[in-house]
Image (cartoon, rainbow, N blue to C red):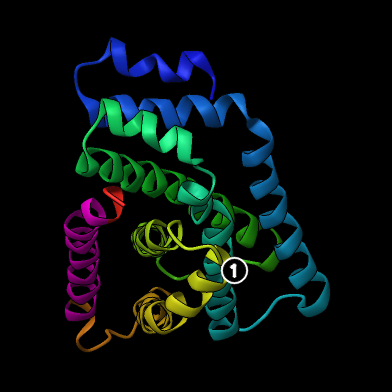
Amino acid sequence: MNLAAENVYMKNPNPILALVKKEILLETRQQYTLYGIFLYVASTIFVVYLSMGLPEDSVWNGLFWVIQLFVCVNAVAKSFLAESRGRMLYFYSIAGARDFVLSKLIFNSVLMLLMSCISLAIFTLLLGNPIEYGWQFIGIASLGGISLSLVFTFLAAIAAKAQQQAALMAIMGFPIIIPQLLLLMKISTAAFSAVVQAGWWQMVFLLIGLDILVIALTIILFPFLWKD
């Protein structure tokens, strides 16, 4: 790890903020990771454009969230898988388990929020803009990006303790993320039509409740993995 990134903690008494700054510092200095994710987003959407042109509203919406899912896997899932045992021991000596995992949740949420905005911009540029209520969809995309990042951060924390990390994430992630993805698609359809969707706010609050549940489970369960 870069020494400057390691010493961030010593300059800030707040361990969560210090660890978030460390993550940002590493990402800015190892820019190939961020650029790689951006290239993946742009190339995937460009291939969709070449194969489909301007899709219908429902297809546009479905493609957006499916691509967001794979972007999240590439951007967020590496957060724990890239941490070596020696690096984890170092973090164990300077911060508690809850501080460490909360810093991961915050950083990955911000990263996925950025990726969601970039994906939406490229989607609009290449695949047209069938959205009737732009700000509403931006809010849903932001909330959805954060929701996906929370789930995959939680899964990455568990999978990091297993040898077959990628396979374990796929096995655990499929039954968890599919209902959430369908819920996001259902919520976001309201931005494509002037017709008021019954129970829309209930679905939004359900998604927020699921996010709170994931955060609570991560905070409760991660200290047991931390001690392993």
Residue 70: image location, x then y, percent? 58, 66
Side of 49 where 94 appears, left or right? left
The residue nearer to you, when weighing 40 against 63, is 40
Residue 164: image location, x then y, percent? 56, 67
Q: Which residue is drawn at 57% across and 66% down?
A: 166
Q: Is residue 6 above or below residue 221?
A: above
Residue 33: image location, x then y, percent? 64, 40
Q: Which residue is drawn at 23% across and 73% down?
A: 204
The residue nearer to you, when weighing 85 against 102, is 85
Report which quarter residue 181 is drawn in: bottom left
Q: Does the magenta stretch include residue 212?
A: yes
Residue 79: image location, x then y, percent? 47, 47
Question: For the magenta stretch, what is the residue range?
Answer: 202-224
Q: Mark 1 points at which residue?
A: 67
Q: Residue at x 21, y 36 (%)?
A: 96
Q: In this view, does 48 lie above or below 123?
A: below
Report which quarter residue 107 is drawn in: top left
Side of 220 where 62 appears, left or right? right
The residue nearer to you, when weighing 180 against 219, is 219
Side of 29 where 83 appears, left or right? left
In the current view of this chain or complex, which residue is farthest to the front?
228
Side of 194 where 14 appears, left or right? left
Q: Residue at x 74, y 72 (%)?
A: 48
The secondary element bearing badge 1 is classed as helix
Q: How crowded is mark 1: few (under 14 residues within 10 Å), some or many (20 or more)?
A: some
Query: Type of residue at label 1?
Result: Ile
